[in-house]
Image: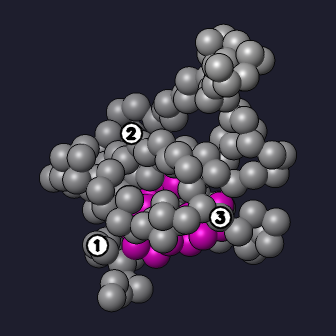
Amino acid sequence: MLSRGPLCARPLCTRLLHSGPLMAPDPSRPVETSIRTKLTEALQPEHLEVHNESHMHAVPPGSESHFRVLVVSPCFQGLSLLQRHRLVNTTLKDELSSRIHALAIQAKTPEQWTADPALGKSPGCLGGSKGDRSVQEKLQTGPD
């Protein structure tokens, strides 16, 4: 069983630059709230952005299935990009196994964030088969 404590320690003097986890949880966004809470507790980020990008995909309105996160944490110091992503994925393993369909991760050290404070953009979604004409043709003709 995983402990609820932080996965890394950082000085108390480090300032938090994000506001989301400190706000009251929004009951209409339980997945986003869970992501913010877990990443804050585990990685103690200096900056955290959680973006629900579900509206860009072929899902019902109000869905919480596609997210992009930007996590800036001293915990990432000395870790490869793969190790950083694994750390985020481990932290969100319950959500990834049940409620999140897609998670884009940017995991930066404070130094990397200072040098390049940009959030990457997600590519446009074609909605699965929505952009594939051959699938539409197969659906119209039916089985042989």
Q: Residue at x 56, y 24 (%)?
A: 123
Local secondary structure at mark 1? loop
The Cα atoms of the two marked residues, 1 and 3, are separated by 23 Å
Q: Residue 115, how many percent across, how many down?
A: 35, 33
Task: Say which residue label 2 marks.
Answer: 114
Task: Say which residue label 3 marks.
Answer: 31
Can residue 120 be seen here? The reply is yes
- Tell how many labels: 3
Query: Which amino acid does the dot numbered 3 rest on?
Result: Val
Q: Is residue 119 left or right of residue 76?
A: right
Tag of residue 8: 1
Q: Is residue 25 above or below residue 118?
A: below
Mark 3: give few (<14), some (14-19) or many (20+) Cα within 10 Å: some
Can residue 44 be seen here? The reply is no
Based on the picture, tell me whether residue 75 belongs to the magenta stretch.
Answer: no
Local secondary structure at mark 3? helix
Q: Which residues are magenta?
A: 32-49
Q: In front: 141, or 32?
A: 141
Q: In front: 86, or 18?
A: 86
**Callout 2–callout 1 Cβ contact below 8 Å:** no
Query: Which amino acid does the dot numbered 2 rest on?
Result: Thr
Q: Residue 96, how many percent across, how many down?
A: 49, 60
Mark 2: give few (<14), some (14-19) or many (20+) Cα within 10 Å: few
Q: Residue at x 35, y 46 (%)?
A: 108
Q: Nearer the viewer, mark 1 or mark 3?
A: 3
Q: Residue at x 57, y 56 (%)?
A: 100
Q: Residue 117, how many percent across, how many down?
A: 46, 35
The Cα atoms of the two marked residues, 2 and 1, are separated by 20 Å
**Please, what is the dominant secondary structure of the magenta stretch?**
helix
Q: Residue 111, how many percent across, how many down?
A: 30, 44
Query: Which amino acid does the dot numbered 1 rest on?
Result: Cys
